[in-house]
Amino acid sequence: MRLIIALLAVLPLPAFAHPHMFVDSRLDLTLDADQNVTGLTLSWSYDEFSALLILEDMGLDPDGDAQLTEAELARLKGFDLIEWPEGFEGDLYFYRDGVQVPLDHPQPSAIAVTDGRITASHTRSLTPTPAEGLQILQYDPTYYVAYTLSGGVHLPTPCRATLIPADPDAATQALAEELKKVPEDQFSILEIGVHYAEDVRITCNAPS
């Protein structure tokens, strides 16, 4: 998810108060018989303008009809997983008891272009972790990308996900506090994305 990272170096500081790319997400969790999370499938649907820039940058869909051939789709698949530097979390964070749960490197699983939007899916595995009490956050630390879990979080019963929306007023206040720390004559990338993240909590009934 670092498709336009070069632009960040030239944007003025106030630009970071709002996102420039919008992504609708769907998260599917895989559980074992003991209600441990063992893997996930995450789908990202990019906004139309971002999708247009991506296709143009890759030299795909030259006629602009948003109808890609099978060969073009094959080239597109996994495009957003190529630039994955060491330490990059994939804008997805799992926590249990306040401790971050590591996620394995992603593998592309599906790609589609529908109504001018690119929907790219990938899978990730993790060490079996109890689903009960799991917290999940999805955000770009710089808030260049705004994520919305409009597709929901899906997992087998009896476990369920509760999504707590971000508090925009609290996020705005946090941004104001961060801006106070930046000297007027200096450029700084503010890591404010966490304040705009939806908070997902997983609960389960005890296995029978």
Image (tube, grey):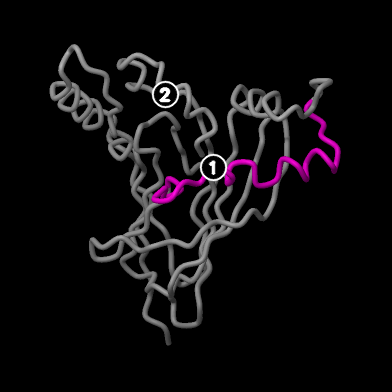
Image coords of residue 182 (percent x, y): 17, 22
Instruction: Determine the main secondary structure of the stretch shown in magenta.
Output: loop
Image coords of residue 57 (percent x, y): 67, 26
The residue at 32%/21% (across/down) is 17
Above or below 107: residue 167? above
The segment highlighted magenta reads 66-91
Between discs 1 and 2, the one toward the N terminus? 2
* Kind of residue at badge 1: Glu
Quickly name the residue at label 1.
Answer: 83
Q: Is residue 84 magenta?
A: yes
Describe residue 163's horizontal placement relative to residue 182 as left or right: right
Describe residue 92's horizontal placement relative to residue 24 as left or right: left
- Which label is found at residue 8? 2
Q: Nearer the viewer, residue 54 or 111?
A: 54
How much space separates mark 1 and mark 2, taking CA atoms?
Answer: 15 Å
Task: Place residue 206 in its image quadrant.
Answer: bottom left
